[in-house]
Image (cartoon, rainbow, N blue to C red):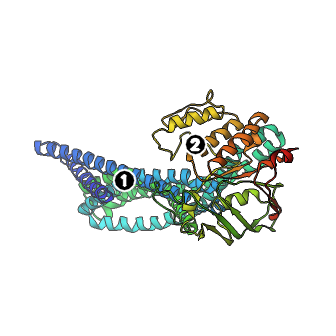
Amino acid sequence: MVVITIIAALFSGAFNAGLLALINHLISASGDTSTFLLLAFGLLVLGKITTGLISQVWLIRFSQQAIADLRRSLVAKVLKVPLAKFEKIGAGRVMASLTDDIERLSTALFTFPLLVINIAVLIGGSVYLAYLSWVMLLAIGVLMAIGAVCYRLLILKGFHSLRFARDSGDRLFGHFRSMTEGLKELKLHRQRRNQFLDEDLHATTAEFQRHSVAAEIRFILAHNWTHLLFFVLIGLILFMGPTVNNMDLKTMTGYVLTILYLMGPFSGVMGSVSVFGRAEVALRKIDTLGVTLGSHVQERGNKDPGETVHPNFKVLEFRGVSHVYPDEQGDDTFTLGPLDLTFKPGELVYLVGGNGSGKSTLAKIVTGLYAPETGEILLDGTRVTDFNRDNYRQLFSAVFSDFHLFDDLLGLKAADIDHRANDYLRQLHLQNKVTVVDGHLSTTALSQGQRKRLALLTAYLEDRPFYLFDEWAADQDPYFKNIFYHQLLPELQQRGKTIFVITHDDSYFYLADRVIKLDSGQLQKSNEVHLQRVSSHQ
């Protein structure tokens, strides 16, 4: 497509050069309006418009395909990156590339057909000027070369400022994310809101503005420098051409008209510098992000979405598993483990512990979202590695404390999915709030507790052998909390599911087969308890 675009643009430039020659001839040879010249004028205009249209249409198709492929490539890389690595990269940086950087590349690609046409027009005009007087064109070329060096020096600082502006853009997207996710907290605390606006957001936007303005001023100066050069050329031709080169009136008229005509295309080329400068910075950012994401892609997951891996496992073992990361207070590290755990089908296991004890980290390790830094995970005696970890994750259905609800039941394509989903909605007491039609949820705008029930609905429909619930009952009223512990969990257990529940509800501990307690990342207690429920409850 690019080749076709360039060929069409070159033909467009040739037609432009032909129009210039014909117009100059008609002006110089007054009264010569033969049918042949009229026909030639019409054909040249038609050829210019047609080739310009072809080049733009073809490249628009190409640019849209390129942008779509780039977005898909980045999203695919993000989905392959291990969760811990993605958290270090930062969601703000990824969002900036998927939105702002892609948009700037898209703008540059849309500008490319016009740029190619303008360059072709300049080439065609130069050929016509050489035909009129190659000596004068050579002199103009020397002057333009000097002007180009000065132009390059002017815009170098502009590119430098653009890179600083793009770095500020990353931080700006981080602030936008903080605003959307912390809007309630900002509204409730005036001083926090004012400090966020006056210091965090204001400082970053001011820095972004400063660098962007500095870059654009450089580009404007460079753009106006080119205009000055054009008028200097016209002045030299008008006042020095007849004396220096004995230029006749036809040649002088041709040069002046051609240079005036070429000012538009040349200004278009120079004006593209800013657009392509921003696109270059954006492309480098995307390329760096792609390399960063690619360098973290360690897993080689199963690409067959229809293949079920270990639908019924016998034993899941964790031997000496640990995970280390910096704590929130400083440079010290928090270490989870080493831990030795075993899970079997049909077990109901509770995980308890204080805040910061490592419960959520353990949940991510158990479900394969974090790879253990030491130790090993064995599924029916087979070690879980980077080559089979994605298959391993297909064992689990989970509702995390920071869960996300999709509007559709993605990945669930059974013929009876609507019927099963609506049955579960009745069981979850949501039949009057939500309906499922063609796998689409009628609404997700519910209370937090009801949203967690919808997340539980998705987990039920997945029907996997291992269920994990991270503080699921924390947002439920006492009535439904009792249903969760006394009805829903036992029903899953009766179906042979392994259930791992992170909870603080100590009044329900007696229902568990085992209670695992974490304290500062260490296994404090792991009791195999099979107490009589009635006596334990008493």
Nearest to the observer: residue 217 or residue 402? 402
Under tag 1, what secondary structure? helix
The Cα atoms of the two marked residues, 2 and 1, are separated by 32 Å
Residue at the spot x=56%, y=39% of the render?
407
Q: Is residue 50 visible?
A: yes
Name the amino acid type tagged 1. Answer: Phe
Q: Is residue 503 above or below residue 525?
A: above
Amino acid identity at mark 2: Phe
As drawn, 391 above or below 398: below
User: Of all residues shown, which one is farthest toward the right?
Assistant: 538
Camera-nearest residue between 73 and 61: 73
Q: Where, quadrant-wise, is the C terminus in this rendering?
A: top right
Residue at the (60%, 60%) spot, across then down: 161
Q: Position of residue 447 (x, y in %)?
A: 70, 34
Could you tell me if residue 32 is visible in this image?
no
Q: Nearer the viewer, mark 2 or mark 1?
A: 2
Q: Left or right of 514: which side holds 244? A: left
Q: Residue furthest left?
A: 35
Residue 406's disc number: 2
Q: Is residue 289 left or right of residue 226?
A: right
